[in-house]
Image: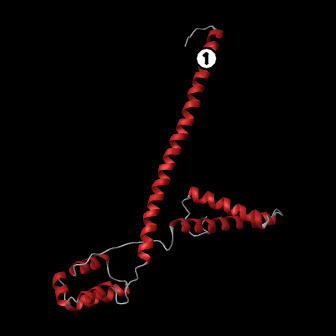
Amino acid sequence: MEYKNNYSTYTMNLNTFIPYICGIKYYIIPYIYGMIEVVMNIKSLVIKQYQEIIDKATQQIKKLKTPPEGWLRTNRKALQMPAKIIMKKAGIKTSELYRIEKAEVEGTLTLNKLKEAANAMDCDFHYAIVPRGEIKTLIENKARRHAVTLLNSANVHMQLESQGTTAEQIELQVDQVTEQLIKEMPEWFWGETNDH
């Protein structure tokens, strides 16, 4: 670039420099957007993998029902393992074993105690937290409830201003807002529907 005091030379050089900068701008911006899209695709792929893991575990766990007497007592009886053997292995007293079995049924036993008792019976301890349904369905249902709440509130205000919408328009809006909420997953998404 020439730095002469001549205004026309400066303008000529500036006029050739600006298209060059703009060319870079038009090359870099799509590249950046492309990279953002790649990152977002990777993020959604990872989320989908997590959802598949949880959905598979949910299907397997739902088939299991806790026995009425609890897993500890049921295993002990099925193995025909004398209580004194378990107590010796676990290093506990007689009354302690029965208290542990009772606490399991009541839901007051710690995970560590369950693990120790299972180990004393040569059993494995498995622990899982699974949702009450398929992940995709839970997300869609939650988004729809939020969408209905948000749009009902907006519709009340519009009706007050004599600008109410038809049932078809509301349903279309609910679908659109639901899709947007699923895509964005705002911070308040898993809160109550009236918390936003």
Side (left or right) of 182 relative to 157: left
Position of residue 125 relative to residue 16, above or below, is below
Q: Which residue is mark 1?
A: 16
Residue at x-position 76% and y-position 65%: 168
Q: Residue at image x 55%, y 65%? A: 139
Give the camera-side residue of 104 and 58.
58
Question: Residue at point 35% right, 83% down?
Answer: 108
The percent coordinates of residue 160 (x first, y second) are 80, 66
User: Could you tell me the amino acid type at mark 1?
Assistant: Thr
Classify mark 1: helix, strand or loop: helix
Furthest residue toward right: 162
Residue 124 lies, with reference to residue 23, above or below; the image says below
Q: Residues within 10 Å of mark 1 (few under 14, many from 20)?
A: few
| Relative image position of residue 19 (x, y in whole percent) | 61, 22
- Which of the pair 3/102 is nearer the observer? 102
Percent across and percent down for residue 65 are 40, 82
Question: Where does the C terminus fall, quadrant-wise?
Answer: bottom right
